[in-house]
Every structure is written in structure tokens, then in C-alpha cells.
Amino acid sequence: MKCLLCESFSLLHICPTCQELYLTPKIYKRKILNNIEVISFYKYNEIKELLHTKHTDLGFYIYKILAKLSFTKFAKEFDIDEKIVSIGIDDHIENGYSHTAILNNSLKSKNIKPLYNKLRAKNRISYAGKTKEFRILNPRDFKLNEFDNNHIILVDDIITTGSTLSQAIQILESSNKKVIFCLTLSDVSFE
């Protein structure tokens, strides 16, 4: 097959050279609701076309590569004395896989245990390209499936206005859960 970026022959959808040249993650931080930190690894415009593959079968492979380069590397370097859990935002299966579940699964390490099917949106409306006002008027209406752990990392692919993560934080806090921080692949605000 050919690398999606340079079109040279590769056994991967994005060759190792292009991964190193174009997909080396950096750390971008911002704070949202209750001063909770959101850590992102890419500027949205840097990987926009790759992120949009989540709506296709190809997205499974692209998200695995992005997750390995960023989330897996982060999990290996993350050091904390207690065991915590990570939860993907609305990790329902679409196109045969869940992009947030792929990201969440890549955090599996000695200190982080990924949980699945814990935070699902009852409102399935898409926020893609929508205004902050639209997002406020059409909340995700998350349903929380109970679990024992109280310290959580929230996982999503993109942060735009922060409304999805804020809604998730609110539902978790209303169940006496503490969100330590959030992780996303990309942040739109760093453009």
C-alpha cells in the first residue's frame, strides 16, 4: 500500500518517516470548567484530514497510529502513585469501531485502566461545524453507567468549545467522581 502522506510504498497507512516528520506530538494545554486541564497533542489544522477519517473504515488504522504516537507515549511517561481510570467520551461503535475507544485503550498502563461504555450521549446530534450557541442549546445529555473508581481521565478526539468535555465533567462530578484532567488528540483553539 502507499503512505497517505507521501505516497511511497509502506506497510503502514502512514509510513514511519511521515509519522516522524509530520506527526510528532507536542503538548497543548487549556483549562475548562472548574479549572480542569485539557491536554492535547496536535493543533487541529495539522491533522484535520486525518481526524475526518473517523467517519470511514480507514479511520480505524489512522486513529491507531495517532493514538500510539500520542496517548500511548503519554501513558508510558505518566507517573502517579494511585491507580486511575480513563473513560472515552461516548465510545459507541460507528463504522465498525469507536475512535474514542481506540484512544482510550492506548492509555492502558500500570497506572491507568481504561473503562468502556461508561459515558454515553443520549442526544446523538453532531456538533461538527456547529456554533457554541448550538452546542449549549443541544446538550449531549450524557448517561453515566456506574463504576467504582473515583479518579478519572476523560478522553476525546477534538476539543473545540469545550462544551462536550464540560458536560461530561458535570455528570461525573454529580456522581462524586473527580476528573483529574482530559486528553484530546487535537485542540481547535491553537490555530
Image: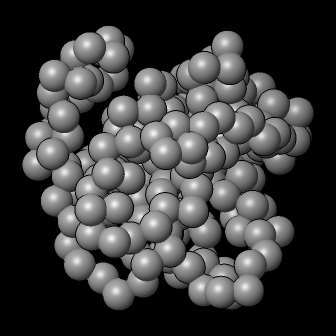
- Give 77 or 70, whichever is nearer the viewer: 77
Quick one: quadrant of the N terminus? top right
Considering only vertical position in the picture, is 153 above or below 32?
below
Asked which colour scheme the image uses, the reply is one colour
**Which image quadrant: the C terminus?**
top right
**Is 191 placed left or right of 174 in the picture?**
right
Please give the count of numbered marks on the rendered protein.
0
Q: Residue at x 27, y 69 (%)?
A: 175
Question: Could you say where residue 18 lies in the image, as x and y percent from the top left?
Answer: 82, 35
* Residue beneath the point at 49% across and 62% down: 179
**Left or right position of 182 against 89:** right
Q: Where 20 sits versus 108, above or below? A: above
Q: Position of residue 90 (x, y in %)?
A: 29, 53
* Residue at (25, 49) in percent of width and height: 94
Between 43 and 17, the one nearer to me in the picture: 43
Res 63 seen here: no
- The image shows residue 46, relative to residue 118, as above or below, that is above
